[in-house]
Amino acid sequence: MNELFHQQPAETLSPAERRWAIDSLLQRLERVERSCQGGFPLYSPGLTDRWVVSSGGSWLGGFWAGLWWLRARVTGVATDRAKAAAFGPRLAAKLESQSLNRSMIFWYGAAPGALWFGDEQAQRLLEQAAAALARAFDREVGWIPLGTEMGGGADGDRRIAIDTLAPTLRLLAQSPRCDIRELAGQHLQATLAACGTWQGAYCGSSHHEQGRIVRHEPAGQWSRGQAWAMLGLVQAAGLYGEPYLDLARRACDYWLRSRPDPLPANRLERPEEGEDPSAAVIAALAMLGLSSLLGGDGPWREQAECLTAALLRSRHFGSTGVTSGIFGGMCYRTRMGEELVESACSSFFLLKLLLVLDGRVDPLAC
């Protein structure tokens, strides 16, 4: 396989490379499952394959279920679909958690089953999760707060976060209830006002303090935060059209202006602290969605191809032996501080990105 990875120009992946990477990620699920012995995998440092496991999954549990739904989509095997569906009752325990991160759990963990396979249990979870999020909507500030659980912190009930924008928007917008669907647009507008700038730069989070919005960091500095914003705006454009299509284009333009290297620094103001390849994955997926909305116009697919090729040829993706299929490129806060890890979240987005590039999944799908 190493020869395959060095035969193509640096800017592109061959179909053979892309499909090998897809197969490697799919096969990796079985090895992770054996390592975790029934628990939810949280993270494994680098390419070590040494997992920290959770019985409940925290905010990452939905991505583990989502990976099995992606596998079922590719293989068409009934046992893969059954395995993905079996996570539903375990995820349901998080329905009343005081965290907006529930949107990640239930959109990525249930939407593939509901939308691709017509799974009734998954559809119920989507509706229940949307209703639970709606109950948390704060009408004073016009958004759903991050909440105090799953890392939200003591001020979580006053905070809004950009990373949950895409799944929150999709969960609310797909609800059969009109009153819940209306909240999607309100939360979207409040999030953009709290975290965004007209130049297309976005910060990771803000909070409401004495009638004003206080940003936690300069806009556009955190790479994964910018990528989350791009993903959310592309989903908003798919649902509502303009002005969100133009805003999505601006956010993607800002990424290209501010991050000329394919593997961006985790935080632009502190490049010495290292890169976050997972941000490039999410950004590339957003660019593919933008390209689809624009009918293929613009440089967005080409840019996504370049980002993906650089990532798969980097030290962060294991391509031989025991490291095959390991994507150890997500910057994640552990007990040791921020470090690069393998996680269900980053592997989910990388697998989805590759499936979109291979024409097997729509970029605006779940």
Image (tube, grey):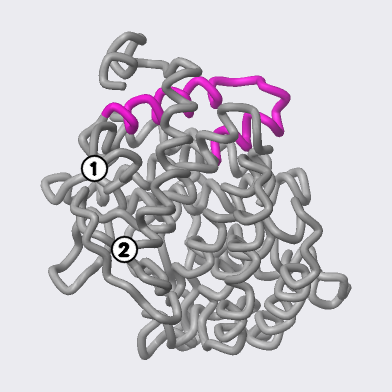
Task: Return the x and y of residue 117 as percentages of the image width and height.
Answer: 76, 54
Secondary element at image label 2: helix
Residue 144's image quarter? bottom right
> Tag on residue 322?
1
Residue depicted at x 68% and y 40%:
245
Question: Which contiguous range is marked in magenta?
Answer: 286-313
> Tag on residue 364?
none
Residue depicted at x 87% and y 75%:
177
Magenta stretch holds residue 288: yes
* For residue 182, side relative to residue 80 (left or right): right
> Could you say which is closer to the camera, residue 137 or residue 47?
47
Residue 189 shows in this picture: no
244, above or below 188, in the image:
above
* For residue 246, side relative to residue 275 (left or right): right
Dot 2 amino acid type: Ser
Residue located beneath label 2 in the image = 35
Magenta stretch holds residue 32: no
Task: Return the x and y of residue 71 as percentages of the image width and height.
Answer: 57, 47
Residue 15 shows in this picture: yes
Residue depicted at x 33% and y 35%:
259
Secondary element at image label 1: helix
